[in-house]
Amino acid sequence: MKIDWAALASVFGVSLVVTVALVGLFTLGIVALSKQSATAGSSAAGGSVALARTGAYTCFALCVAAVSYGIYLIVA
């Protein structure tokens, strides 16, 4: 049995990068939602609350898209 170490290292590297990016994107969405609730209590403009909500939903949508694509790759 021969192990292709280059392919194993490539899969590990890509998995690590995608995992860190996905966690970072989800964290960015959580931070945007916390900024939204923090600015909602103050007398800030409504535009910044809408921008924070839109950014958070965009981050979450990208997370769902990445997870869906991963499931598609596993199933297909």
Image: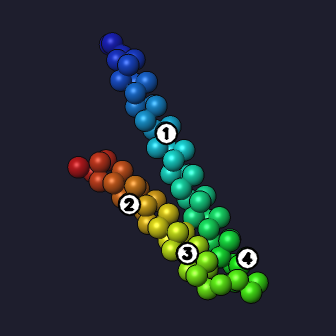
Callout 2: 10 Å neighbours few (<14), some, many (20+)? few
Disc nearest the viewer among 4 and 3: 3
The amino acid type found where label 1 is placed reads Val
What residue lies at 59% left-to-right and 60% top-to-bottom?
28
Mark 2 or mark 3: name the one nearer the start of the chain: 3
Q: Which label is found at residue 65?
A: 2
> What coloring was used for the rendering?
rainbow
Q: Position of residue 25 (x, y in %)?
A: 53, 56
The Cα–Cα distance between marks 3 and 1, rounded to whole angstroms, is 28 Å
Q: Residue furthest right?
A: 42
Identify the element where label 4 is drawn: helix
- Indicate whether 75 appears above or below 11: below
The residue singled out by tag 1 in the image is 17
Pointers 2 and 1 in contact (CB under 8 A)?
no
Pick the front one: 65 or 3? 65
The residue singled out by tag 4 in the image is 38
The amino acid type found where label 2 is placed reads Ala
Tell me how many marks there are.
4
Disc nearest the viewer among 4 and 1: 4
The amino acid type found where label 3 is placed reads Leu
Residue 26 horizontal side relative to residue 12, left or right: right
Q: Position of residue 38 (x, y in %)?
A: 73, 76
The residue singled out by tag 3 in the image is 51
The Cα–Cα distance between marks 2 and 1, rounded to whole angstroms, is 16 Å
Callout 3: 10 Å neighbours few (<14), some, many (20+)? few
The amino acid type found where label 4 is placed reads Ala
Mark 4 or mark 1: name the one nearer the start of the chain: 1
The Cα–Cα distance between marks 4 and 2, rounded to whole angstroms, is 28 Å
